[in-house]
């Protein structure tokens, strides 16, 4: 607080309201009750501030381990919530069931400022330790609550406003609290609403994470709400027993606690069996189907989905369903926006959340930034978003800002009129931006765009018109803008390498694509790639499966696809074994190709690829296979014998494969193995 007088005034106010019932109307019931608990039950003194205790590193790690699934399901929602609120003077905070802060998202300056008051990871913010506050009071009230400035117990915290919502697990127990703490002088009602929505998404993610092998039922009394936060969610075992229910599900079914439903058969809730609901959902391409309540004869609409592997078995075992799936993939049957993005994830909750978020914002033509490591599928994701956007009738135009020479980026983006410069095409050329008019412009590796062009791009985005090089007239354009980068654009802004005004024009919403090593659906993704690469895909041996799942995949999905393409090419039987996989996959080592080549120079001349190699006759699969062989040759310094051993084939077989793939050495092959 600003002065000792202010502190004394606040202390007298707390004591007056607690000891004088006639004055209690000046505070909300929950705040007055909290002040009373702090004074009488916890023996706290509002005039004697005590900093909240902070756990040791070992104690905090134990807490985080115990709440690992809660933290994993909350991190992305907390980051999204922080971006939505767009206020550098706030922190999004997660506490466990005892009030210990286990994760926090904030700007560095604000985080450092509130850390001085004890708001930091590892600190205990229960009412017993920190008095009346959003997180601690929410844990006791078990309901959404706002504690605004002078409603805090300690004068030290009267500059803060807290909006908090309890997070319930599938048993109805409070496992944590999601809180937004800010310096705002006024209670921001929209903050409490957004906190409540984020809390609900975390609760749904917890059910997905804890019951990933269960069948999921989403239902609502109105069909348009199926698949939204308002829908009820049930996790059901294969034998039809309800394992978990969201609070929205209990509300829909007019139940008070999970115990009234969990452990009972699904037929006690609806007048249909699990098998019937799944079969009808598949036949209806996962549009909501109608069922009735088993007791009240109320009508509901639902979709029922098996786990990823189970759904695949059902679809592939039913020829009619499989044909429908193929037609859907060709776009001849409309199955909803989310269905069109189903090829992007196969059960990973983080990826599913990002897909749902992107599917919502793309409808409003909000600019999107895709953030993810190289190889995580940013262009595939962008192309899929284009297919469900209002601009899907237009063209999807992709530009890799990192691969184009700096002197060509401007003409590529903005185009040029006839004779604009030496070497220009006689009739001029439309730029990528004009080509994307009415469609989607995808700017990959936007962080590598030169600063001078960033200014021109900003003007195009703001004015929605482009002037080709050498032209005096402008062309009106309208396009959906999607950008992507594996770099942190905000860090580039802070270092002066990226324009701040352009960053905020591009960043309507940031979508984060998790690296392959962190995805929970890696095995299903491997199965999908195998099916997409072969009409009769081989299975995986137990050892090969374990090797693939244990590897860290620095090249992410792109690297995985190349490895599986090579394995299919080398596999002569019905099963992929470790012998068909690169050595670094089997041994679990991350390849360091470039450093190895640069670290030492061989005593004999290094063989290399002839510069005049023509690969135009190769098909797409052969091109990828060629790149994989080249990768291995580079790793083993073009020692053909070693590469042949890794692939489990003879040296002559490898030479024939290299000849077929147009991989030629500039020296005689015998010198390669000397």
Image (cartoon, grey):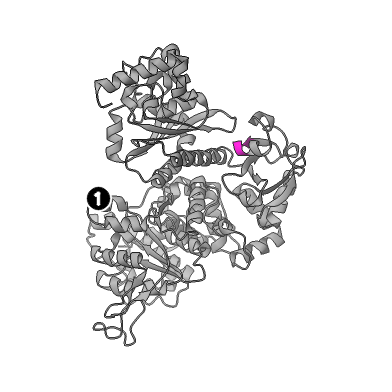
Quarter of the N terminus within the rendering: top left
Magenta region: 244-248
Q: Nearer the viewer, residue 508 or 33?
A: 33
Residue 130: quarter of image: top left
152 relative to 234 in the view: left or right: left
Position of residue 656 relative to residue 566, above or below, is: below
- Residue 480 visible in rendering: yes
Is residue 607 inside the magenta stretch?
no
Q: Which residue is mark 1?
A: 494
Residue 588, image x and y in percent? 41, 46
Residue 615, image x and y in percent? 40, 75
Position of residue 96 relative to residue 423, above or below, is: above
Position of residue 36 relative to residue 555, above or below, is: above
Residue, x 44% and y 14% (percent of image)?
A: 20
272 relative to 22 in the view: left or right: right
644 relative to 215 in the view: left or right: left
Residue lying furthest bottom: 426
């Amino acid at each position: 607080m600003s002065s000792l007088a202010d502190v004394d005034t606040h202390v007298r106010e707390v004591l007056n309201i607690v000891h004088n019932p006639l004055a209690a109307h000046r505070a909300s019931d929950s705040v007055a009750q909290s002040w009373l608990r702090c004074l009488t039950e916890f023996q706290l003194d509002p005039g004697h501030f005590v900093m909240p205790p902070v756990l040791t590193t070992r104690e905090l790690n134990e807490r985080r381990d115990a709440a690992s699934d809660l933290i994993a399901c909350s991190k992305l929602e907390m980051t999204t919530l922080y971006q939505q609120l767009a206020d550098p003077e706030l922190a999004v905070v997660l506490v466990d069931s005892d009030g210990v802060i286990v994760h926090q998202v904030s700007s560095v300056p604000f985080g450092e400022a509130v850390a001085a008051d004890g708001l930091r990871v590892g600190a205990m913010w229960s009412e017993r330790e920190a008095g009346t506050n959003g997180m601690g009071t929410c844990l006791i009230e078990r309901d959404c609550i706002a504690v605004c400035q002078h409603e805090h117990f300690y004068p030290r915290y009267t500059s803060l406003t807290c909006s908090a919502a309890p997070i319930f697990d599938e048993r109805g127990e409070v496992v944590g609290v999601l809180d937004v703490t800010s310096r705002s002088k006024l209670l921001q009602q929209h903050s409490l609403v957004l906190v409540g929505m984020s809390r609900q998404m975390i609760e749904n993610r917890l059910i997905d994470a804890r019951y990933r092998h269960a069948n999921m039922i989403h239902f609502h009394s109105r069909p348009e709400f199926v698949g939204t936060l308002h829908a009820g969610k049930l996790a059901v075992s294969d034998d039809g027993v309800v394992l978990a229910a969201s609070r929205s599900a209990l509300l829909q079914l007019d139940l008070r606690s999970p115990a009234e439903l969990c452990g009972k058969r699904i037929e006690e809730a609806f007048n249909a069996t699990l098998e019937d609901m799944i079969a009808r959902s598949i036949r209806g391409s996962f549009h909501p189907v109608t069922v009735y309540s088993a007791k009240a004869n109320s009508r509901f609409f639902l979709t029922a989905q098996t786990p990823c592997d189970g759904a695949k078995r059902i679809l592939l075992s039913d020829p009619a369903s499989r044909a429908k799936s193929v037609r859907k993939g060709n776009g001849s049957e409309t199955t909803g926006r989310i269905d069109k993005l189903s090829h992007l994830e196969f059960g990973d909750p983080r990826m599913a959340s990002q897909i749902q978020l992107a599917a919502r914002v793309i409808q409003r033509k909000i600019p999107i930034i895709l953030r993810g490591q190289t190889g995580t599928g940013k262009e595939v994701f962008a192309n899929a978003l284009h297919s469900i956007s209002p601009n899907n009738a237009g063209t999807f135009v992709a530009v890799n800002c990192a691969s184009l020479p700096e002197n060509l980026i401007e003409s590529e983006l903005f185009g040029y009129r006839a004779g604009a410069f030496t070497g220009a095409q006689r009739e001029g050329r439309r730029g990528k931006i004009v080509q994307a008019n009415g469609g989607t412009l995808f700017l990959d590796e936007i962080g590598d765009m030169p600063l001078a062009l960033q200014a021109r791009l900003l003007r195009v985005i703001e004015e929605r018109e482009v002037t080709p090089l050498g032209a005096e007239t402008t062309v009106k354009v309208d396009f959906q803008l999607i950008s992507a980068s594996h770099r942190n654009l905000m860090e580039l802004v802070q270092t002066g390498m990226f324009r701040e005004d352009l960053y905020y024009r591009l960043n309507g919403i940031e979508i984060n694509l998790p690296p392959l090593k962190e995805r929970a659906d890696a095995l299903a993704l491997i199965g999908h790639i195998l099916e997409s690469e072969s009409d009769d895909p081989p299975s995986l041996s137990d050892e090969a499966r374990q090797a693939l799942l244990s590897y860290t995949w620095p090249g992410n999905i792109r690297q995985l696809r190349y490895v599986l393409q090579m394995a299919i090419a080398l596999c002569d039987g019905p099963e992929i074994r470790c012998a068909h996989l690169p050595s670094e996959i089997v041994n679990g080592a991350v390849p360091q190709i470039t450093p190895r080549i640069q670290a030492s120079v061989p005593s004999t001349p290094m063989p290399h690829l002839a510069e005049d190699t023509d690969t135009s006759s190769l098909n797409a699969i052969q091109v990828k296979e060629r790149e994989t062989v080249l990768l291995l040759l580079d790793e083993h310094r073009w020692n053909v014998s070693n590469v042949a051993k890794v692939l489990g084939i003879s040296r002559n077989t490898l030479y024939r494969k290299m000849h077929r793939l147009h991989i030629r050495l500039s020296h005689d092959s015998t010198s390669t193995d000397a």
